[in-house]
Amino acid sequence: MKITLSVIKADIGGYVGHSESHPDILAEAKTCMVKPKNDGLLIDYHVTKCGDDLQLVMTHQQGEDSEIIHKLAWDTFLGCTEVARQLKLHGAGQDLLADAFSGNVRGMGPGLAEMEIEERGAETIIIFMADKTSSGAWNLPLYKMFADPFNTIGLVIAENMHHGFSFEVHDIKMGKKIFFNAPEEIYDLLVFIGAPSRFMVKAVRHRGSGTIAAASSTQRLSLIAGRYVGKDDPVCIVRSQGDFPAVGEVLEPFSVPILVEGWMRGSHNGPLMPVAIPDSTPTRFDGPPRVTALGFQLAAGKLVGPRDMFADISFDNARRQAKDVADYMRAHGPFEPHRLPLEEMEYTTMPQVMKKLEKRFTSIG
Ligand code: F6R
Ligand code: MG
Ligand code: MG
């Protein structure tokens, strides 16, 4: 049975500031999903949040890039923006960058991770959602899951994974894509994906069967808007078990709170802290960046779940370490490498300050 899983998200208003989503927004989004499900357009849905981002998880049989599904998400975001305006939430409608819907949500502001799959006998899915960070934050975790035997022992000892995975990498500055085969091309792959602000892992496929294993959102809001309008706060879908890494192998990369760009004003490096959904409330210096993970079993497209995967106490050390790293990074204040390099910063006063001081700059000689 072919099923499409669409995860579409947007920040349509924060409560309080950019720290959390208001319960009325989630309630409105759920209301918007009821009729499409009763009408049979959606097989199932789950509405959730990660920090100030509204997340719509939908299953259906309309395929990827379906106009009707994307319009449903867009209209839901519009309806929720209306609620955000009434409550005067912060940044109401901030990620809706287009005036009107046209065809699909790509390039319009919302983040999108989507995959059409042939549902397996048991279809285990993990959906990752992040707040206060950029698309590209998934590069290192996806590499570890699908190419690093120190993370995924299945690559070594499970016959159905031993031939490796292929990585689809997008150069979002040039609008180009390239495919790499792991393990034999990992050095070439790492040259690119080690620079996640430009090169992003869009998808991963099983090399034996060519089937999709992971899909991520790669939209860069600042490139779409031409200015800073909030961080991308990306999402990623990963299939697990059988031909794919086990649940524990999929979650393992997050046991270390890696440094990602984002945090306060989208202009800082900080630790990506794995948290349960209720703890996705980035408050300290508008952070530190959070990642959540919801696990589902699919049953003919029905979303059986979710299980809040990072609620497990075995991620307590990662959280403690993230808090220590946050203290350490914060001690640098406005200095790099806590502050992002000039060209990566979402905010900068440099042009104005330069202009003001232009005449005071004289030659060193
Ligand atoms: C980071 C983020 C926040 C805001 C900051 C200022 O992704 O969303 O750190 O950049 O709170 O927000 P505004 O400009 O909306 O007052
Ligand atoms: Mg926000
Ligand atoms: Mg956000």
Image: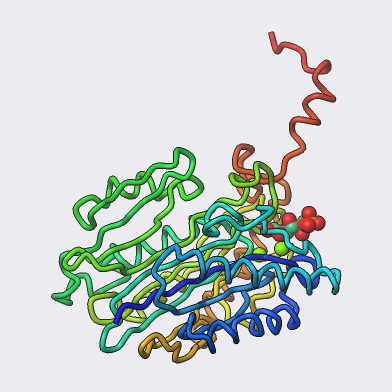
Residue 295 falls in image quadrant: bottom left
Q: Is residue 144 above or below residue 56?
A: above
In this view, the residue farthest toward the left is: 159
The image quarter in which residue 311 lies? bottom right
Q: Which residue is drawn at 45% across and 79% down?
A: 59
| Residue 29 in the figure: left or right of residue 122 | right
Q: In this view, does 115 lie to the left or right of 160?
A: right
Task: Answer left or right for 99 relative to 204.
Answer: right
Number of numbered markers:
0
The quadrant of the rendering that contains the N terminus is bottom left
Does 210 sit above or below residue 15? above
Residue 152: x and y, percent? 29, 72
**Relative vertical location of residue 26 with respect to residue 355 in this rendering, above or below:** below
Find ligand 1 in the image and state its quadrant: bottom right
Q: Which residue is drawn at 60% across and 37% down?
A: 343
Front residue of this view, candidates 245 and 39: 39
Where does the image place residue 177, in percent across and percent down from the top left?
Answer: 36, 46
